[in-house]
Amino acid sequence: MISIKTLFRETPWLAVTIVVLALIALYLLLGGVWLATLGGSAYYVIAGIALLLTCWLLANRSAAALWVYALLLLGTMGWAVWEVGLDFWSLAPRGDILAPLGVWLLLPFVSSRLMPRVRMARAALGFVLIIAIVVLGVSLARDRRAIAGTLPENNTSDAASSASSAPAAGQDWTAYGSTGFGTRYSSLSQITDANVKDLKLAWEFRTGDHKGPDDPDEITNQATPLKVGDLLYTCSQHQIVFALEAATGKLRWKFDPEVKHNKAFQHMTCRGVSYHATKPGAVTAGGGPAPSDCPARIFIPTNDGRMFALDAQSGKPCESFGDHGQIDLKQGSEIQTLGFYEGTSPPVVTDKVLIVGGAVIDNYSDRVPSGVIRGFDIYSGKLIWAFDAGNPDPNEMPSESHHFTAGSPNSWSISAVDENLGLVYVPLGSGSPDIWGGGRSADEERYDSALIALDIGTGKLRWSFQNVHHDLWDMDMPSQPSLVDLRSNGSVTPAIYIPAKTGDIFVLDRRDGHQLVPTPEKPVPQGPAPGDRLSPTQPFSQLSFRPPGMLTDAQMWGSTMFDQLACRIKFKRLRYEGPFTPPSEQGTLVFPGDFGMFEWGGIAVDPKRQIAIANPQSIPFISRLVPRGKDNPAAPNAAHPPGTELGVQPMYGAPYGVDLGIFLSPLGIPCLEPPWGNIAAIDLKTQKIVWQHRIGTIRDEAPLPLPFKLGVPMLGGPIVTAGGVAFITGTMDYYIRAFDIKDGKQLWQDRLPAGGQSTPMTYEVGGKQYVVTVDGGHGSFGTKLGDYVRAYALP
């Protein structure tokens, strides 16, 4: 064997090649042995040995090195296809180091130093590389993860005759989800699948509201604007309200509630405002005549726990509402720490009652404000009723001797309402703290992570449905539910579709809550942490985007074989026994993770075509219980300020804190193979997923602006129009996109100046249809912050 010193002197490129291959071999061998001892794939051990043999043969200038390397490449291809099939993005990290190195070995200044019969050895390695190129080419030709279906053309037959029985947005968009039904559907059809490609920017407005030095990381503008008459109403992250001319985007008025910036706030966001107009002869909830001021009003909740009512034409506070136009939502709670109760979502507006929920700080303590749901007189702001989910008597009103229950389940998202049935549908989170439940009583958690249907006039429970029993995974109900009348054989069933973080969509009769799509209870993993308990079963809807089966180390991913190996080891070291594996000190893989397969964006429903458009995402989390100790004390201190949702969460009042994080590779990318985000369509007649495709590229997250369509995470939801087009902006790359609802084909896109973590909307003014998006970015999501409101229209 020639010495390394001689190799570097006589053939420096060959020597460098040997050193590089040897380092790779040692990494794969040592990591492979570690993985194998954990029960993972033995491939890396074999690859490491093959590379060491290649190094030894190269050091001896033997052409057999190329034969060994060719066999390694061939074996790697066979192993990769056996593990993941012909899926390009799953195959890529298994060969993106070895294949280029194979090309390097063929270069003359390396391979010409080898003998004997080097020409034949080079031909063998070259032939294997050609096979690799063919395999990758075939894997690129189709997306193995996609569902390539087409919605039936005749889906309107039963629905067309009476689709108008449900409210729908048209010229105006009067509520967050287009109407109180939360369908995110517009009857406008000027923009169609044929002409959407011609959309151009019509106007742009800058709010001027930016992140300040005292703002938390979780700062974002998630607003969906409203449009009524000739005005567009929206808000910015500090809950500043703007009224814009719908045709031009020019500012008519703005209102600043002067929310103080505070790093201790867990959120600084606005999802939108609510609108209410006084009808002729209207009376208050108490029976008196409606006040004359503010004949149309805008409601805006704030992050410091207030609710404002503003005159829709002038932006001035409505004097007849509360204390000169505002009420304090912290009233009735014993704990009133600033930032512990935040209004982040628009309230529900009905004829007489304003229904309000709010966000309560997550995982900080068991002594946090109540998540009580309240009904206020829409004119005076007087409290009419309460539903305090943690109280044995949830309708008990506050008094000098009674406060709302600390830490009871809250509703931080958006509710839906059916005024004909007299019901409001409220999605609830879990009691605090989220990841530990040993101290919760049956009364306190009977409505945890549930959808409750409340009487609009009294707040009394009509029915409820729990999505997760004894929730230890932060699997709260995150989305505004969607109300749709299902039509079949001449009959109509009033349904409610409830997207869940788990990826399930629960379909119930909205009159009484009985299941329209079966949701059987199935056994789930057991073995809670000491002092806690578990439900033996959990509900699993038969309409679901939850991936079937268990995750395996073959599904672990990376940009290279190096970080993929690290992800496999990390996966095998965690506790994971499938969905609902309990939190542990070892560290538990939570999949779907805390972001959820569905978030506050919900789904979009076309009631005429009887279809729904959804955008599920797949990002695992790690939940690691942290015993009390020096770095995790039992009482609050400066080491754990409340302004975060990731990292160590103290959970004061529980025997553990929790360290929450996204399951990432050493290079900061998800350890689970893509796609991480999809857009999909559901046929509501069959309750089946008809098509599903990846959405979004890594252009704005990768070191280089690479337009690779992996399918990326997103925050924000879709809308759907009568023109046969769905719009969405929420992806981690900065685009607004339009899709053909028949088959999911992308029809158009435009570059946004910042992250579009919001849900768009559409309206008509002056005979022209506009599509509007708010592009404010998202601090903790990692997208570029901005202050843009942008409108598109046909030229």
Image (cartoon, rainbow, N blue to C red):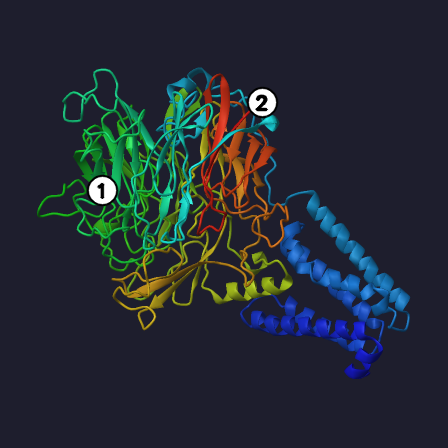
SS at mark 2?
A: loop
Residue occupied by mark 1: 329
Residue located at (75% from left, 73% from top)? 16
For the question of whether residue 686 can be seen, the reply is no
Front position among marks 1 and 2: 2
Q: Is residue 693 above or below residue 560?
A: above
Residue located at (47% from left, 43% from top)? 786
Quadrant occupied by the C terminus: top right
In the image, is 32 to the left or to the right of 395? right
Q: Is residue 226 above or below residue 717?
A: above
Q: Amino acid at mark 1?
A: Leu
In the image, is 708 to the left or to the right of 596? right
Residue located at (37% from left, 51% from top)? 215
Q: CA distance from mark 1 to mark 2?
A: 46 Å
Q: Amino acid at mark 2?
A: Pro
Residue occupied by mark 2: 795
Residue 702 or 309: which is nearer the viewer? Answer: 309
Residue located at (53% from left, 48% from top)? 676
Quadrant occupied by the N terminus: bottom right
Q: Quadrant of residue 132?
A: bottom right
